[in-house]
Image (cartoon, helix red, strand yellow):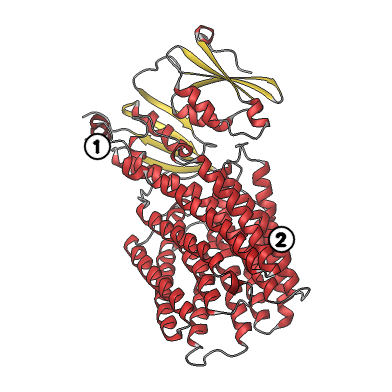
Amino acid sequence: MTPRPPGLETLRRVDVDVREDIRAGREPFARIMAAVKALGPGEALVLRAPFEPHPLYAVLGAQGFARWTERLAADDWRVWFHRPAAEPDTETSSTLDVRGLPPPEPMVRVLERLDRLAPGGTLTVLHARRPMFLYPQLDDQGFTHVTDEPEPGLVRIVIRRAPEP
Amino acid sequence: MTPAASVRPSVALPLAYVCTAVVTFVLAAAAVPWLSTELAGHYYQPHILALAHTVTLGWITVTIMGASFQLIPIMLERALWSERLAWWQLAFMVTGVTGMVGHFFLGAWSGLVWSAALVALGVGLHLLNVARTVRGVGRWTFTARMIALALAGLGLTTLVGFALGLDKLVHVLPGDLFANLHAHVHLALLGWVLPMMLGVAARVYPMFLLSAEPAGWPGRVQLWGVALGTPATVAGLCGVRGLLVAGAFGIVAAVVSHLVWLGAMVRTRRRPALDTGLRLVLTGAAALPVAAALGLALALDLTSGPRVALAYAALVLGGWVSLTIAGMLLKIVPFLVWYRAYAPLAGRAPVPTLPELSSASGERLSWVLLTTGMAALVVALWIGEAVWIRVAGSVVAAGAITLGATLASVLRHLVRRPAPAADAVAARRPA
């Protein structure tokens, strides 16, 4: 388990326990999203689930949430979702791994990161396949990009924002 | 490291095909209770032939063609050769299939042949377009090979089907009518639909299930099973009886290998909860071993007759193919709509997730109605009681209407999407 991120204890907890929902065969997604929608500043959603909720990571990650996961037992997981402290306005070089995310989360993540990319900066994206639907979006925004496959099952896309004239 | 080819996958084109196909599916499903008396009899009747071609051409083939135009750029990583040709193809297919169904219904063979010629033209355009698209493809993956097999099967099915129609006017085909008819049906099923669905499954299911891409011996067995099993089965049905059983075993081996892959994908998936689209796909897959066993029993002469044949057809076309396609549509349509409506906003403004575009209750209801209705229809057709066929057909029709309404609610996002903020649009344009 990774160490608890600093500042988490200062957030007000909004607890949502979906273990009973899942055991009863009920879909808890709508309930979780309603709680997320109602989250105010300084609040964190604390989710209890009988398994690690990987799909939710992608969904809430795309909405800017960071997470901290605690495994309390094999069938008892507690995940804190919170909005991280403000990040720098721009970045010049970074890597983003979007393998294992369902469509269209990889595209959302990449475009979010590109929005913060400084002029002349590069973003290296690690993907499971060539993102054929992303390329036109990159072209529309004036990014240059090159793609290669360093190993089977790994596609690397290096995206560069043009430097300021 | 090379600059990526920036193809711009069309959204309107696959959506036009899919919408056409779903409307056809609703009409076909609604026709089942209406034709219950005929369905309780022999399958070789004008109205049943009209229904069969509504399902196989208007629903299944048009969906596969439309989905190909979305999936080929993803699966083969290259742009479609000509989008304009694909629009012409849709026009020929819609006109041709409508004509074929109408003339089958009336038993008017001359008009049927002309309509079949239009369908053949549409199929020809599809083959040309996809062949030019995949020309020079660098890696002949399992999926690429299966698509190539499927396209060969589609071409042959169309030729044999056209010849069957022409045979009504001028005697052109040797052999027995029913032998030729069964060969045509199995060429379509095993030569066109089966390899396409197995090939697409290997590439697309891992994306949806978030599992490892399948590999190993099951792929080889599927390829050889279909490549050898289909011609052997068709030749066996045409009179070379010794080949029929061998071909059937080849197909069964391919089906079992596909299910082995599917089982591995389901077990290794990183998405624990299955959404309704995936449930439909897996329920459809559950019909496949039953259909394969029934097909093998028919090949071995353990069972026979029009009742079993109709139940077998419903199990394959309604149970496996239709449920799988319905599940895939619940994944494909929201993605296309999201891409058209929200991709330009992604990263700059909050955008909905795919589940938020659709109605979860509508999806679940269509799954329940379609799966129970299809299962009941298979049993009712086997028994041959018109009243039970009418009841089961009504449930299927309700499921099809629910599916259509659910997908229509997704399409509404195309017209009521939020306008992008002016600064966001400006920032997205290159300087």
User: Is residue B105 among what the camera can see?
Assistant: yes
* Location of residue A161 (image quadrant): top left
Q: Earlier in the sequence, mark 2 or mark 1?
A: 2
Q: On the rendered structure, is A40 left or right of B289?
A: left
Name the residue: 42% across, 45% down.
B410
Residue B141 visible in the picture: no
What residue appears at the point 41 percent right and 83 percent down from the top-left corner? B111
Residue denoted by label 1: B430
**Amino acid carrying mark 2 in the image:** Val
Q: Position of residue B205 (x, y in %)?
A: 57, 48
* Chain for numbered disc 1: B
Q: Name above or below for residue B336 compared with residue B316.
A: above
The residue at 52%/75% (across/down) is B47
Residue B290 marker:
2
Q: Disc number at residue B235? A: none
Q: Is residue B209 left or right of residue B431?
A: right
Q: Please tell me whether mark 2 sits on a helix, a strand or a loop.
A: helix
Question: Which one is closest to the eye, mark 2 or mark 1?
Answer: 2
The one nearer the camera, B250 or B372, is B372
Disc 1 marks a residue whose amino acid type is Pro
Output the chain of dot 2: B
